[in-house]
C-alpha cells in the first residue's frame, strides 16, 4: 500500500538524531587506473595509476554513513601512532556532522586496506593491520570516549571488524555503559562467538555471520528465523536483523515475531559497504525514536540505494526521502491498468465477492507531481489516492465500452449529474447495479477553476 510517505517525517527527524559509533576503524585506499598491458617481468597486469583516494572504513564508514543521512555521529576508535592514523584523523575532521575521538595505541599499526582497481575491476587488495586487543591505556581511553559520547547520543553502534578494538571484554563493557545510560545498542558482529554482545538490542549479521554464530546452515527464511531466535535466546538480544544480500533483510524479535523486507529492486553496481550503510541507517533511525520495524524498513531502502553506487558510498537523507516518495508513486503506478489487466483484476475482485464501483471524469487539474510520463500523469495522481483501487485511461469520448466490459455494481458520479444523464447509468441498472450520485463538496469544481484561470 502507499503508506511509505508516512515515514518521511522520520527522515526529517534525522537532523536532530545523534549516534555514537565505536569499533574497528580502517583507512580504505583506492588506487585506480587503467590496464593495457601485461608485465614483461611476470604474468600479471600492469596498472597505470591515475588516481588515489582514501576514506574512513569499518566503524569510520558507519559513522560517515550516519552523518551523510543527516544525523550526527560521534566516532570512538583506536588507530596506531602512525601516518595512516593521522590521515584518518584528518579525513574524519573534514566530514560534517562527524566528530572523532581516535585513540592512538603505539602498539598497533592502523588498519589499511588498499584496493587496486583497473577500470571497474578490482585486481588486488592489500591489508596492513594489527589484529590484537588494545593496550591497557588505549582501552581505558576508548571506553572513556564512548562514555562521553553516550551522554548525548541515543544509540551506540559497535562496528566489529575483528581487529581487536572490541576484543577482550571491551564490547561487553561498552554495552554495560550504554545500558546504564539507557541507550540502545546496535552491533554489527564478527566471529562465531556472540557472547561479548550479550544484552544488545539489535545485532545485524549477514547470512554467513549468522550461520557461523548460530552453528547451523542458513538457507531459506525459516532457517534464518530459527538461527535468529536461537541467538536471541542464547545471548539475551532484543532482535536480530539478518542482512541477506539480494534477498533483503529479515528482522527476528525476542518475542519470536519476524518480518521479511525484500531487497529494493534496482540496478546493482557495487555491494561493498552495503552492510555499513544498513547499520548506519538502522541506528540513525532508532535514534530519531522510530520503531524497530520502521528503522529496519528504511535501512533496507538505504542499502538498496547504496548498492546502486560505485565503491564504498553513502546515502543522503534526501535520497532516502526521494526513494520513499518514489515508492509511493510506483505503488500508485501499479494501479494504472490496461483494459486487459483491469478485466483480470475485476474478475479476481468478483471471485473474492467484492462489489465493483466505477466512476469516470476529467481529473487533469489535480497536481501531477513529478510523474514522468505526462500522458499518465493524471492517472498516477488518481491512483495515488488510497480510495482508488485501479485506474484505466480511455480514449473514447465516453466510458461506455469500458462500463460494458467491467459490468460494475456501482456507478458513481457527482450529484451535478442526474440519473438520466449519467453515461452508462441505464446499462448498469440493467444488470442489477446502482447509480450513486455523490454529494457535491461545495466550492470545488473543475469548471469553476478553469473559469477562474481563464479570467
Ligand atoms: N545484490 C543486491 N541487490 C539488492 N540489494 C542488496 C544486494 N546486496 C545487498 N543489498 C542490500 O544491502 C543490505 C546489506 O547487504 P549484505 O547482506 O551483503 O551485507 P554485508 O555482507 O554486511 O555487506 P558488507 O559487509 O559488504 O558491507 C541487504 O540487506 C540489502 O538490503
Ligand atoms: Mg557487514
Image: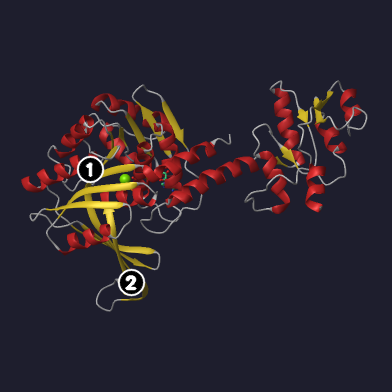
**Residue found at the far bottom of this picture:** 40
Q: From the viewer's perspective, is 57 left or right of 271?
A: left
In which quadrant is the N terminus drawn?
top right
Q: From the viewer's perspective, is 366 left or right of 324?
A: right
Cα distance, mark 2 to mark 1? Answer: 36 Å
Give how far across and how far down residue 283 sits, in percent. Answer: 34, 40
347 w.r.t. 154: above or below: above
User: Which of disc 1 and disc 2 is earlier in sequence?
Assistant: 2
Q: Residues within 10 Å of mark 2 (few under 14, many from 20)?
A: few
Give how far across and how far down residue 226 sits, in percent. Answer: 35, 27
12 w.r.t. 431: above or below: below
Give how far across and how far down residue 294 sits, in percent. Answer: 44, 34
**Residue found at the far right of this picture:** 420
Residue at 78% from the left image edge and 51% from the top image edge: 453
Residue picked out by circle 1: 149
404 w.r.t. 256: above or below: below
Residue at 82% from the left image edge and 43% from the top image edge: 447
Query: Which of 213/134 is in front?
Result: 134
Q: Quadrant of residue 222?
A: top left
Q: Quadrant of residue 366?
A: top right
- Secondary structure at numbered mark 1: helix
The image's colour scheme reads secondary structure
Q: Residues within 10 Å of mark 1 (few under 14, many from 20)?
A: many
Report whether residue 58 is seen: no
* Disc sitting over residue 51 in the figure: 2
Report whether residue 236 is seen: yes
**Residue found at the far front of this picture:** 455
Amino acid at each position: 500500500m502507499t503508506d511509505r510517505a508516512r515515514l518521511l517525517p522520520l527522515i526529517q527527524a534525522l537532523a536532530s538524531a545523534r549516534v555514537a559509533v565505536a569499533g574497528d576503524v580502517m583507512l580504505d585506499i583506492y588506487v585506480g587506473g587503467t590496464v593495457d598491458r601485461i608485465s614483461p617481468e611476470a604474468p600479471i597486469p600492469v596498472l597505470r595509476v591515475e588516481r588515489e583516494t582514501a576514506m574512513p572504513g569499518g566503524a569510520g564508514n558507519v559513522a560517515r554513513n550516519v552523518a551523510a543521512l543527516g544525523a550526527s555521529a560521534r566516532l570512538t576508535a583506536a588507530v596506531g601512532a602512525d601516518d595512516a592514523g593521522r590521515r584518518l584523523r584528518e579525513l574524519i575532521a573534514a566530514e560534517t556532522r562527524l566528530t572523532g575521538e581516535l585513540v592512538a595505541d603505539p602498539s598497533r599499526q592502523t588498519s589499511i586496506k588498499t584496493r587496486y582497481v583497473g577500470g571497474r575491476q578490482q585486481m588486488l587488495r592489500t591489508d596492513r593491520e594489527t589484529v590484537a586487543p588494545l593496550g591497557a591505556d588505549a582501552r581505558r581511553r576508548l571506553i572513556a570516549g564512548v562514555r562521553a559520547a553516550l551522554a548525548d547520543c541515543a544509540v551506540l553502534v559497535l562496528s566489529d571488524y575483528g581487529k581487536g578494538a572490541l576484543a577482550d571484554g571491551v564490547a561487553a563493557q561498552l554495552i554495560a555503559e550504554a545500558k546504564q545510560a539507557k541507550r540502545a545498542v546496535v552491533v554489527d558482529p564478527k566471529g562465531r562467538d556472540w557472547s561479548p554482545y550479550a544484552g544488545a538490542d539489535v545485532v545485524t549479521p549477514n547470512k554467513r555471520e549468522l550461520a557461523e554464530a548460530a552453528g547451523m546452515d542458513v538457507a531459506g527464511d525459516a532457517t534464518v528465523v530459527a538461527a535468529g531466535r536461537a541467538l536471541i535466546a542464547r545471548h539475551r538480544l532484543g532482535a536480530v536483523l539478518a542482512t541477506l544480500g539480494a534477498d533483503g533483510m529479515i528482522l527476528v524479535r525476542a518475542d519470536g515475531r519476524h518480518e521479511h523486507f525484500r531487497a529494493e529492486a534496482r540496478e546493482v553496481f557495487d555491494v561493498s559497504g552495503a552492510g555499513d550503510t544498513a547499520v548506519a541507517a538502522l541506528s540513525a533511525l532508532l535514534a530519531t525514536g522510530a520503531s524497530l520495524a520502521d528503522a529496519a524498513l528504511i535501512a533496507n531502502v538505504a542499502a538498496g540505494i547504496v548498492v546502486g553506487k560505485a565503491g564504498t558510498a553513502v546515502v543522503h537523507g534526501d535520497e532516502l526521502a526521494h526513494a520513499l516518495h518514489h515508492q509511493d508513486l510506483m505503488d500508485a503506478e501499479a494501479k494504472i491498468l490496461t483494459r486487459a489487466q483491469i478485466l483480470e483484476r475485476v474478475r479476481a475482485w468478483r471471485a473474492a465477492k467484492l462489489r465493483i464501483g466505477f466512476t469516470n471524469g476529467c481529473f487533469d487539474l489535480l497536481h501531477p507531481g513529478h510523474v514522468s510520463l505526462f500522458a499518465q500523469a493524471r492517472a498516477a495522481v488518481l491512483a495515488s489516492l488510497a480510495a482508488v483501487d485501479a485506474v484505466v485511461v480511455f480514449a473514447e469520448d465516453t466510458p461506455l465500452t469500458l462500463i460494458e466490459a467491467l459490468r460494475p455494481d456501482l456507478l458513481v458520479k457527482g450529484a451535478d449529474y442526474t440519473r438520466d444523464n449519467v453515461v452508462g447509468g441505464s446499462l448498469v441498472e440493467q444488470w442489477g447495479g446502482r447509480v450513486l450520485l455523490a454529494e457535491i463538496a461545495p466550492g470545488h469544481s473543475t469548471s469553476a477553476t478553469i473559469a477562474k484561470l481563464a479570467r
